[in-house]
Image (cartoon, rainbow, N blue to C red):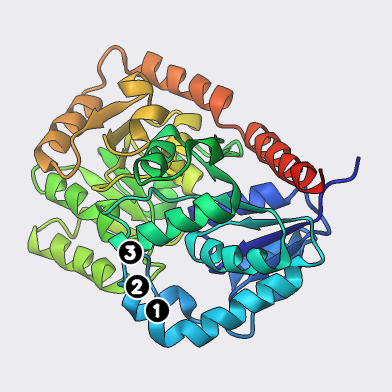
Amino acid sequence: MSLPRVLFVNHTSQIAGAELVLLDVVERWTGASAFLFEDGPLNEAMTSLGIRVIGSAWGRDLSRFRRDSSIWNAIPLAGRLGAISWEIGRAARECDVVYANSQKSFVLAAVATAVCRRPLVWHLHDIIHRAHFGAMQRRIQIALANNRATQVIVPSQAAASAFIAEGGRRALVRVVPNGVNVAPETQSGLQIRRELGLSEGPLVGVFSRLAPWKGQHVVLAALAKLSDVNCIIAGDALFGEQAYAASLRDLAVKLGIADRVHFLGQRSDVTKLMQAVDVMVHPSVDPEPFGRTLVEAMFVKAPVIAADTGAASDILEGGAAGMLVTPNSPDELVAAITHVLSRPPDLGARVEYAAARARKHYSVGTMREGISSLIGQAASEARA
């Protein structure tokens, strides 16, 4: 049986967590189409996988309208948004299913598919929560999902619960955990450190884009109370958050730890870097829908400390696969880092358990099969 013809829609061509998932999903759909609002790295990556990329004539710089912006800020963009929706609808007529991979793409695809009458699958990579979206945005998302989405795919129970709590229909939700593929690393942690010019002392790692809700500032506050502990921060500002990135460097200077904090920028070798650290910290201060770097660290057997918000507890099985701390609490983070660096007797067993859990629940193959099945189901129901 042939695969359904799918139009994958994404609003940005920068590659962050949601786009990494999308690239894993589309790998099975060679010859499918992708509608992207702008040119960039995702465009090139899609093309390399054999996906036909359709670019928008109106989508450039639309990613500057952030998800926490007031809905009124979208009014001057109404004409462009309508034009993009029309472009999506035109492309969708050649397909069986439209798959929206972001909040912005979903909103416009919902309008488009109402006209062209195609089933719409929304892969919701966010937690619909007041920390991330304004009240009007949340109402619009839920209303469109309840009326236009065939399915809403979420990566965790935390994301599912948030969707339902905001009024989303429970029957729409399908939980498919994100899959992670980690290549084996041949270099030792010591070799990787030397390559980066780092000392052999205690080393903490933080791996995510630089954004206030990601909580890198909490780690810096904790490091100020941990003498002789170094830190690498891999990631950069991607969505208009450059001011926060600059503030982190200023904060490191103010706290007197600039010589111990190494900002590495955006990296494509995160899992390699994880194998050089003594502990990986996931310090989000607001709920996360998933935690890709948590799973990557589990795969490579790096001890994990995570703020207990969003999906972290699900992934770490309530602390069995890593330590959980209160969000935005530098003091708790200091205590947790100190504990891990002391190499407690149960640390080895915990990281082995975490790796086994990652292999069982968070493989790319399992995710791809789950999403493929749901897309096929949406196409079949539309034909019935």
Chain-order first, disc 3 or disc 2: 2
Using the numbered discs, state the Cα–Cα distance from disc 2 to disc 1 in whole angstroms: 6 Å
How many residues crowd mark 3 within 10 Å: few (<14), some (14–19), many (20+)?
few
Quadrant showing the N terminus: top right
- Measuring from the top left, give residue 99's x and y in whole percent: 65, 55
Viewer-side residue, 102 vs 171: 171
Amino acid type for the residue under numbered disc 1:
Ala
* Residue 256, picture quadrant: bottom left
In the figure, 208 relative to 325: above or below?
below
Dot 3: element: helix
- Measuring from the top left, give residue 141's x and y in whole percent: 44, 58
Amino acid type for the residue under numbered disc 2:
Ile
At 67% from the left edge and 47% from the top edge, which residue is drawn?
A: 25
Using the numbered discs, state the Cα–Cα distance from disc 3 to disc 2 in whole angstroms: 7 Å
Dot 1: element: helix
At 20% from the left edge and 48% from the top edge, which residue is drawn?
A: 219
At 79% from the left edge and 55% from the top edge, which residue is drawn?
A: 96
Using the numbered discs, state the Cα–Cα distance from disc 1 to disc 3 in whole angstroms: 12 Å
Left or right: where 338 falls relative to 305 = left
How many residues crowd mark 1 within 10 Å: few (<14), some (14–19), many (20+)?
some
In the figure, 101 relative to 347: above or below?
below
Chain-order first, disc 1 or disc 3: 1
Amino acid type for the residue under numbered disc 3:
Met
Q: Which residue is mark 2?
A: 71
Residue 74, which numbered label?
1
Of badges 1 and 3, the one in the foreground is: 3
- Measuring from the top left, give residue 267's x and y in whole percent: 47, 58
Given contact means CB atoms under 8 Å apart, are the residues at marks 2 and 1 in contact? yes
Residue 136, which numbered label?
3
How many residues crowd mark 2 within 10 Å: few (<14), some (14–19), many (20+)?
some
Left or right: where 237 falls relative to 14 = left
